[in-house]
Amino acid sequence: MTTTIAHLRNAFAIRGHPRATARDVADFRDRQLRRVVQHAYRTVPYYRRLYDEHGVNPNLVRGAGDMPSLPAVTKTHFRSAPEIDRVARGLDPELLISAASSGSSGRPFMIRRSWLEQNVLHLLRLRALRAYGIGRSERTLNILNPKNVHALDNKRLGKTLVALKLQTDSRRVSIHLDPEQIAEAVRACRPVMLSGYPNMLARVSEVLQRNPVMPPSIRVALTGAETLTPALRSRIEKALGVQVRDQYGSNECNLMAWECPLGGPLHVCDDSVLLEVVAPDGAPVAPGERGEVLVTALHTFTMPLIRFRIGDMAEQGETHCACGAPFSTIAGVKGRMLDMFPLPDGRVIHAYYLTETLVMDDPDWIECFQLTQHRVDRITMQIGPRRPPNPLRIEAIRAHGAQLLGPGVEFELALVESIPSDPSGKFRPARSLVTSSYDGVLAEAGVP
């Protein structure tokens, strides 16, 4: 297991990497790869069995170029093993910090990390804020899912640093509030940065355009968790009068890439994650080509994630950005298309309004799910179970879904053996047939 001293040493290195050379960052990445791969084989039963079955020797992995010799891991295969076999030997999963994935892939998943691992990963987001010119004593506001704080992740360190003005004061407001209420919270907070999911941020921005923050405080808008289309970017920039910058992250690895401060490609957090963009045969794609994303978490030793398929497609970027940053790039991410649902009573809800309550509090029995809005007054939810669910659980989901949507909306729940992907090959876990920010993008690409 990685020691406290090693985590502190890594945290110090991460802080200095924006001023390092690309070779220095690559050397750091390869050292971490060797450590996490060898650690996983020695201490995690799942990886020992997997590598033995494929006849691979993890000790021969010396860096990123050797990773294709290891098998890729799917969520389905990973979750098929008992959780005790997926964490390092001697650890109790219940004593680790847990977080369910957002469900943006339609396949919920529980991640486990130690307190130190959680805080090292947080440094990546702080580094991105610095790149956008946001100082330690300034305030940001994030429009996100309400977050249940794990008992071991009490944020005492962060709160202390914020009080000492040594860390940016990052506040949250629930995405499930009405855009007018969110805009009111923005005006009260007066942040220098406003972030959120692109669809909701566009709606809130247009409210703020009519009744802005005074005097003006917002200097940059950040998006993430969903695909940022050119149309959504334009709506936000026009309404707020500031530049929009995109970020790419996941609960598996936290922040994985952030858009260049000058605009253009996304800088990959090479010192925190090995992000591979691969063809169907597993070979790396060339710059400008699109492929599947595989991730290896470089600082997660409690529950290692090695060549993990997170369900996204990305376009490979150039080896380095023209701005001179010492990080590799991706040109864009194609995934996480989650529509918002307009309802008969005038509400427009995000899919997370339903999923965080209906499936995220108990995700382990669910293999995949999909929400579809057929009409403003009819929404269906399909669930592909990993194992037969408790009938009482199913009835509770039906009742709670109907309660959340209100009496004017028909809510149907069905258990199915499988849920097919769209003709594009992309699985869309939340789709509105009434209105969508993404159908037009797919139509331009020739996808029905």
Image (spheres, helix red, strand yellow):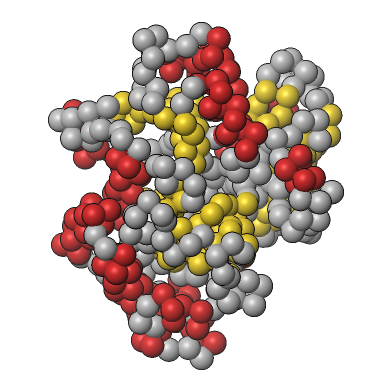
Is 371 situated left or right of 13 in this image?
Answer: right
Instruction: Determine if residue 90 is in view.
Output: no
On the image, which quarter does residue 58 sit in? bottom left
Q: Quadrant of the N terminus?
A: bottom left
Residue with the most extreme bottom position: 55
Image vertical order of residue 440 relative to residue 305, above or below: above
Image check: 235 left or right of 395?
A: left
Q: Nearer the viewer, residue 372 or 236?
A: 236
Residue 236 visible in the current orientation: yes
Using residue 26 as the reference point, say whether residue 166 is left or right of it.
left
Does 251 sit left or right of 435 as displayed? left
* Percent position of residue 52, x then y: 49, 88
Horizontal and vertical percent for residue 216?
A: 39, 14
Residue 224: image location, x then y, percent: 51, 41
* Residue 170 found in image quarter: top left
State the residue at coordinates (33%, 77%). 34
Residue placed at 44% from the left, 81% from the top? 66
Name above or below for residue 330 compared with residue 209.
below
> Which is nearer the eye, 277 or 98?
277
Q: Nearer the viewer, residue 378 or 228?
A: 228
167 or 132: nearer the viewer: 132
Q: Residue at x 42, y 46 (%)?
A: 260
- Total labels drawn: 0
User: Which residue appears at 58% of the width and 70% of the height?
Assistant: 285
Question: Residue 5: percent from the left, percent from the top?
Answer: 16, 62
